[in-house]
Amino acid sequence: LGLSSFHSSSGARRLGPLDLVLSLPDGGHNEEGPVVVADCSNSDATLSSLRLAVARGFGVASANKKPFSDSSMDVFRELTAWHGSCRFESTAGAATPFVTTAMRLKAGNDHVRSVLGSLSGTLGYVFSELEGPHKPTLSATLQRAMDLGYTEPDARDDLSGVDVQRKAVILARVLGHSIELGKVPVQALYPSHLAHVPYDEFVERVCKKGELDDEMNERLLAAAAKQCKLRYVASISDKGASVGLMEVPVGSPLGQLSGTGNLLEFHTKYFDPYPLVVQGAGAGGENTASGVLADIMELAHCAAPPS
């Protein structure tokens, strides 16, 4: 059952996600078997519905990051207290098993010293293009990404880093860190004075006039002088989490990453000196749907235990 607005059987009024969960039978099952509530929205309004679904014994499969990143740590623990009732693989990497890998490392009592990751296909594409053989400017690269449909309708949604910030919070929480979204520093790739200008003006200044080109070129040259590449990285460690530009060694997994793929390096007690590397598509409708479907099927096979 999907968490989206739906019509009542009489068609008299349009109901919301909370109505859907309230309409389900108690006990987590209906006549056909286990009930799984799927949240494929991008809304913060579904949180109460997910909490109610878990409390009533239903399975929850979610691709929506906001209930797991924007909520408090206590609510996150409430939603994820029993893995057999809630799966959220697609919140961090579509169908690429970033969340599952983090869960298994924690379950295996492996001390995860740090995690470094490229968690935005859009920004991964931008930076691998900037360091390609033709060395295009940031303005040209961003314009091409927009033309290819790699960015959100407002490219600032990608360049702000907030989406990566949410993914970092989810992964950090899975690894056992008590962390809140507002405490994770995030570096936007545009100055604050461009945050609220009309989007057409933003595109004119950044893509047409190239206002950010010189500063980015200096950062790229500085990284190259150190045999490094510039990447937009989520970083998680015992000290906390942060999101922003980072110089990484050319030969490292992140340094060799290209295109729109996502990648995580898990540096742990047991995966040392070579990190555990998980790489794959981090976005895309079909990939995300595949991840949610896998979560639904797993939940159906390990339905909530009787109270």
Image (tube, rainbow, N blue to C red):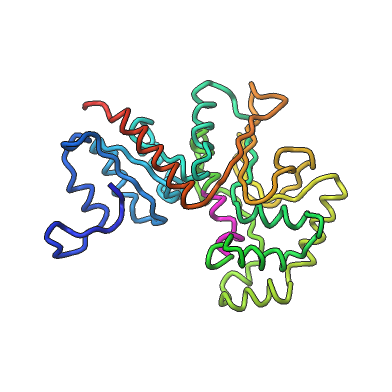
- Between 291 and 246, the one lying in front of the other is 291
Q: Is residue 48 above or below residue 130?
A: above
Q: Is residue 159 magenta?
A: yes
Q: Quadrant of residue 60?
A: top left
Left or right: where does residue 69 sit relative to residue 35?
right
- Residue occupying the point 55% across, 47% down: 282
Q: Is residue 108 magenta?
A: no
Relative placement, left or right, of 272 versus 66 is right
Q: Residue at x 70, y 48 (%)?
A: 258
Q: Which residues are magenta?
A: 156-166
Q: Position of residue 51 (x, y in %)?
A: 30, 43
- Circle count: 0
User: Percent from the top left, x then y, of residue 86?
Assistant: 36, 37
Towards the viewer: 83 or 136: 136
Which of these two is toward me, 206 or 114?
A: 206
x, y percentage for residue 214?
80, 67
Looking at the rendering, which quadrant does residue 140 occupy? bottom right
| Outermost residue to the left | 10
Up the image or down, 83 lies above or below 13; here it is above
x 64%, y 21%: residue: 270
Question: Main SS type for the magenta part?
Answer: helix
Residue extending farthest to the right is 225
Q: Position of residue 168 (x, y in %)?
A: 55, 44
